[in-house]
Image: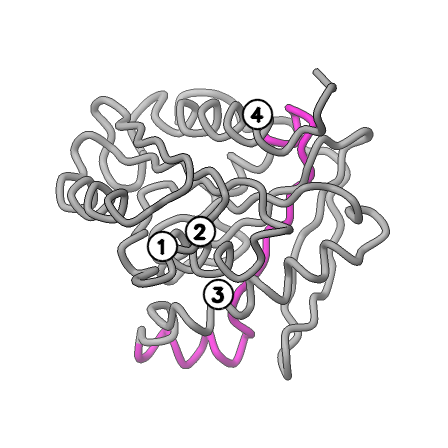
Amino acid sequence: MDAAQPSRDDVRPVRVPAGTATLEGDLGVPEGAHGVVLFAHGSGSSRHSVRNRFVAGALRGGGLATLLLDLLTPDEEAVDARTAHLRFDIGLLADRLVAATDWLAANPDTRGLKIGYFGASTGGGAALVAASERPDLVGAVVSRGGRPDLAGPSLAHVRAPTLLIVGARDEPVIGMNREAMQHLRAETRLEIVPGATHLFEEPGALEKVARLAEDWFLRHLRPSGTG
């Protein structure tokens, strides 16, 4: 990243019930928020992901609320660190996202806001499965270096406009995203970031991701007649 971290605003810790689990998260709601974006992190990551926190800060700067959430409990993360199997349990991750979506829809700070998903890596697949299960609540999906192919049959049932962002040097994932696009019936766009690899570590790459995501979410989440 070649730009400074976006300024930190009022972000507070929250606890989100998800079945028998309680998930830890960080919720930031700027004044007059146009929508709220729920982050679905990727393999072996958490709400502390530097990349997702960078993008979340940029989105809040654009007037969007954000919820960065640990999709696994600390005990589950300890197991996954040894086995690496829970990070690929798309059904489990999607169920957690659905629970967080319902929580956002009921929470006084975010109630009434359209909800978007920002998924990375395996979180991209989980986000699309969850979007197919909450079509009336989820208004947009953005996937960064994601695995939409892991959503399987759910792709055909996604109604939310979906933006797929992939690095130009992440060739296997480009192919997976193009294949997934053949099954998506909603508005879909593929953006390939020149010179970027899977983690978007190159100068300016993550800033480009943040700008693309902000534009997509504001276009699809902002209430009609505003902005």
Along the line of sight, the residue nearer the viewer: 208 or 181: 181
| Mark 3 vs mark 4: in front | 4
Q: What is the three-letter code of the residue carrying label 3? A: Ala
* Residue receiving disc 2: 158
Q: What is the three-letter code of the residue carrying label 2? A: Val
Q: What is the three-letter code of the residue carrying label 1? A: Leu
* Residue receiving disc 4: 219
| Mark 2 vs mark 3: in front | 2
Residue 55: give x, y in percent of width and height.
51, 35
Q: Earlier in the sequence, mark 4 or mark 2?
A: 2
Q: Earlier in the sequence, mark 1 or mark 4?
A: 1
Q: Which residues are magenta?
A: 59-83
Q: Secondary structure at mark 3?
A: helix
Q: What is the three-letter code of the residue carrying label 4? A: Arg
Q: Earlier in the sequence, mark 3 or mark 4?
A: 3
Disc marking residue 94 = 3
Residue depicted at x 40% and y 23%: 208
Instruction: Characterize the local packing of mark 4: few (<14), some (14-19) or many (20 or more) Cα atoms within 10 angstroms.
Output: some
Vertical placement of 221 versus 119: above or below? above
Asked if the residues shown at circle 1 and circle 4 are in contact, with their CB atoms under 8 angstroms apart, the answer is: no
Q: Quadrant of the N terminus?
A: top left
